[in-house]
Every structure is written in structure tokens, then in C-alpha cells.
Image: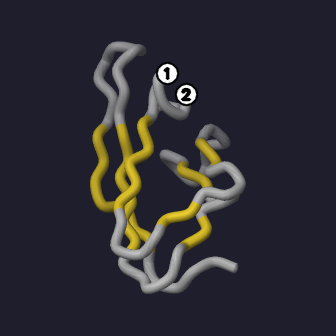
Amino acid sequence: GPGTGPVRLHELMVAGESPAAAGWIELDHSGDTPFDLSGHRLVFRRDRAAGWTFPPGSALTPGRFLTVETGPAGTGWAL
């Protein structure tokens, strides 16, 4: 099952005006066990269907950061 402890948004970089420009989202996990990110979504606003879902097997280990690149080279989804 999912780990304990918070996973939180640590830092955010919004893509530039160019469609090819990438942004990124950095998460951190300060808990004591791995956190299963499978099926969790990143969305810009709750009322928008557009977003990106973590694939099965995605996990964040304790004390680590995870950077998710957005835009064409990353998730294909832009902020």
C-alpha cells in the first residue's frame, strides 16, 4: 500500500512562451516509507481534465525528490 508521510510540491517552473519550452514540477517526500504514486495525477486546476497520471510502479522513496518534466520532451502536458 501507499507509504506514510507527506509528499508535497517542493518547486515549480512554468514553461516559457515557446511550445517547445519545458517546465517541471518537483515533489519531495519526508515520510519514512516509500510512497506509491501510481494513479496519482498532476493537474493545473482541479476543474480541468488535462493532466498527467503517474504510471503503475511509480514510487517516491523517503527523503528524496522527484522532478517531473512537463512539455513535449517530458509528460507531453504543459503547465
- Pointer 1 residue: 72
- Residue drawn at x 30%, y 61% as measured from the top left: 10
Closer-to-camera residue (21/65):
65
Q: Of helix, strand and loop, which one carries label 1?
A: loop
Measured Cα–Cα span from mark 1 to mark 2: 4 Å
Closer-to-camera residue (34/10):
34
Q: Is residue 49 left or right of residue 78?
A: right
- The answer to which quarter of the image holds residue 6 is bottom left
| Amino acid of disc 1 | Pro
- Pointer 2 residue: 76
Marks 1,2: beta carbons within 8 A: yes
Q: Of helix, strand and loop, which one carries label 2?
A: loop
Q: How is the image coloured?
A: secondary structure
Closer-to-camera residue (55/11):
55
Image coordinates for residue 3, horizontal then vertical, percent: 57, 81
Q: Compared to 62, does 73 lie above or below?
A: above
Q: Is residue 10 left or right of residue 40?
A: left
Quadrant of the snapshot with the C terminus:
top left
- Residue drawn at x 61%, y 49% as measured from the top left: 47
